[in-house]
Image (cartoon, rainbow, N blue to C red):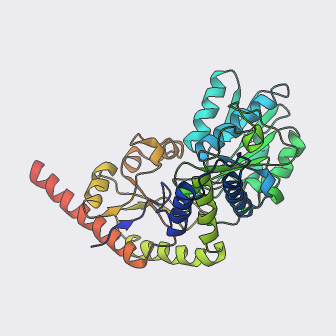
Amino acid sequence: MPQVYLDNSATTRVCPAAAQKAMELMTDVYGNPSSLHTMGFRAEQEVTAARKAVAGLMGAQPEQITFTSGGTEANNLAVFGAVTAHAREGRHIVTTAVEHASVAAAVDQLEQQGYEVTRLTPDENGLIDAPAIVSACRPDTVLVAVMLVNNETGARFPLEEAVAGIRKTCPKAHVHCDAVQAAGKLPLYAERWGFDSMTVSAHKIHGPKGVGALYLRRGSRLIPRTYGGKQEGGLRPGTEAAPLIAAFGAAVAELPPPHRQMPHYAALRQHLLDRLGDHPGIRFHLPKFGVPYIVHLSVPGYKSETLLHFLAQREIYVSSGSACSKGAQSPVLTALGLPAAEIDSALRVSLCRENTQEDMDRFVDGLFEAMTQLASRKEQRYG
C-alpha cells in the first residue's frame, strides 16, 4: 500500500523539476557563479534566474533577495542583523509567544543580553490581531517579528495590517515576517505590505533542504552575521550553493497559483472534519482564520509519540507539532494554554497539493485503529 505523507509543514517531497535542476548544476553547469569564465557565467545565469523566480514568489524585486542556507539562517540574520543595525534607537522587541524556534530562540538570546521583549499570546480563537501588535509597540521598539502562518496551528496573523500603525509608533523599528509556512500556498506581497524583511524556505515548497531566502526592503539595513566575500551583496558571503538555489527556482516555477490550491486544501480539510468531527475522543484546535492546509487535533488519553509510531508502521506520516521541537513539549501549545492531556496527545496534519481524499481516509482509519487497539492493550494490561 502506498505511503500517506501528511507532514508537509515539516518538509515536502522534492519535485522532479527541482531534483533535475540540482543534478544539472552539480554535474553540468558546476562552475562557481563568481568565476569570470564561461562555466562561471552559466552558473551565475542560473542563480539570477532563480533569484527572479523567488522574488516573484515573495512579491519583491530580484535585487531585494538574499539566498541563505534556509529559513533558520534567514530569520537569525533578520533578527540579529536588525537589532544590531538599530542599536542606538532602543532595546525593545515585539514578537509572539508562538514563533518558530528560529525566531523565538534568537529573541531569547537578545533578552539575555538585556533587550526587553513583549511576547503576544493568541486569544481564545488562536488569533493575534493587528491592533494587538500595534498596541505592544513603543517609541523605543527596534524590532517587530511576527510570523504570517503558525507552523503548528495554522493561524494566520495579519502583520501587514499592523505596519502603518507600527510606523507611527516606532518609525525606525524593523518589521520582520517569517513567511515560511505561507510561501507557495498564500499570495505574498513583501514590498507592497511594507515589511522590512521576510523569509521563505525551499524545502517547504517541494524544493531541496539547505536553501532559503531573505527579502530586504530598500532602505532597510541589516548587519551581517558572517564576513568574507561580496556574494549576496556582502550580507551573506560565501560561494553560493548554486545547485540548491537553482533547484529552489525550479520548485517555484512548478507551483500552481494560490487561488487554484486553496479549494483543494479546503475540500480535504472539510472531509477530515466530516469524518472526525463528531468523535467524542478527538479535540480540534482550529483558529478562526486559520489556513486550510494545517489541521491540529488532540486525542486525549493517547500519547502523541505512541500514535505517531502506530501510524508510521502503516506508512502514514503526521507529526505532533514542529519538527524543530524534536519530541519536546510544544512551546506553541503551552503558550495557547491547552490542557496537558491535549498537548501530550497533539497531532498535526499538514497538506500539500499532492494529497488526496484517500490520504485523509487512510489517516482517519489508521487513527481509529490506533485508538481501538491501544485502548484494548491498556484494558488487558490493567483490567
Can you say which quadrant of the picture contains the N terminus?
Answer: bottom left
Q: Position of residue 30 (x, y in %)?
A: 59, 53
Q: Nearer the viewer, residue 198 or 380?
A: 198
| Residue that appears at 58% across and 54% down | 243
364 shown above or below 201: below
| Residue that appears at 61% across and 30% down | 108
Horizontal side, residue 8 vs residue 254: left or right: left
Q: Nearer the viewer, residue 336 or 18?
A: 18
Does the rendering let one see residue 99? no
| Residue that appears at 68% across and 51% down | 40
Q: Position of residue 85 (x, y in %)?
A: 80, 31
View extreme (front): residue: 37
Q: Nearer the viewer, residue 201 or 291?
A: 201
Q: Nearer the viewer, residue 370 or 353?
A: 353
Horizontal side, residue 318 vs residue 117: left or right: left
Does the rendering let one see residue 243? yes
Q: On the image, which quarter does residue 188 sit in?
A: bottom right
Q: Position of residue 248 (x, y in %)?
A: 60, 59
148 shown above or below 269: above
Q: On the image, which quarter does residue 259 sit in?
A: bottom right
Q: Position of residue 281 (x, y in %)?
A: 33, 62
275 shown above or below 57: below
Horizontal side, residue 317 vs residue 53: left or right: left
Q: Number of labelled discs? A: 0
| Residue that appears at 51% across and 63% down | 19
